[in-house]
Amino acid sequence: MDRDDIIGRCMEHKHALIFVGGIATALIGQKILESKQTKDLAAQAMAKVLTCKSELEESIQDIKDNAEDIHTDAVADKKDAVVVDTTAE
């Protein structure tokens, strides 16, 4: 049997080969997902995500505080800028 004959016979049963390939992929995927190393990597990734989230929330709160300060200063400056002319002409 040469290579072309083997490929030809495999192509006759391609649905069976796809089914067997799917089962093999599922078994390999299950082993990978159940491994301790995968669980450790997932835990580390989640910890980094939560750290980034808290840092982002702190940054947003700082921005809000600064915006409130700027608004308060602008309102105070506007009140100071209002000048009433008390001299009558």
Image (cartoon, grey):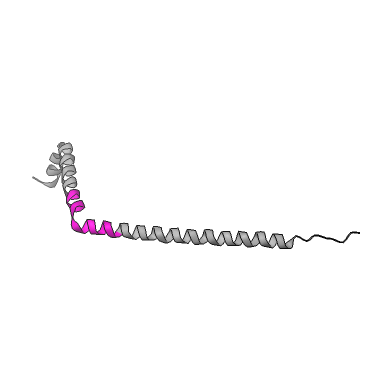
Q: Main secondary structure of the magenta part?
A: helix
Quarter of the image with the N terminus is top left
Q: Residue at x 58, y 62 (%)?
A: 69
Residue 21 percent coordinates (x, y): 17, 44
In the image, is 57 to the left or to the right of 3? right
Residue 5 percent coordinates (x, y): 12, 42
Q: Is residue 11 visible?
A: no
Q: Residue at x 18, y 37 (%)?
A: 15
Query: Total of numbered circles in the picture?
Result: 0
Residue 12, image quadrant? top left
Q: Residue at x 49, y 59 (%)?
A: 61
Quarter of the image with the C terminus is bottom right
- State yes or no: residue 55 in magenta: no
In the image, is 83 to the left or to the right of 57? right
Residue 67, image quadrant? bottom right
Q: Is residue 6 visible?
A: yes
Residue 82 percent coordinates (x, y): 75, 60
Q: For the magenta stretch, what is the residue range? A: 28-44
Most foreground residue, 10 or 25: 25
Q: Residue at x 42, y 61 (%)?
A: 55
- State yes or no: residue 43 in magenta: yes
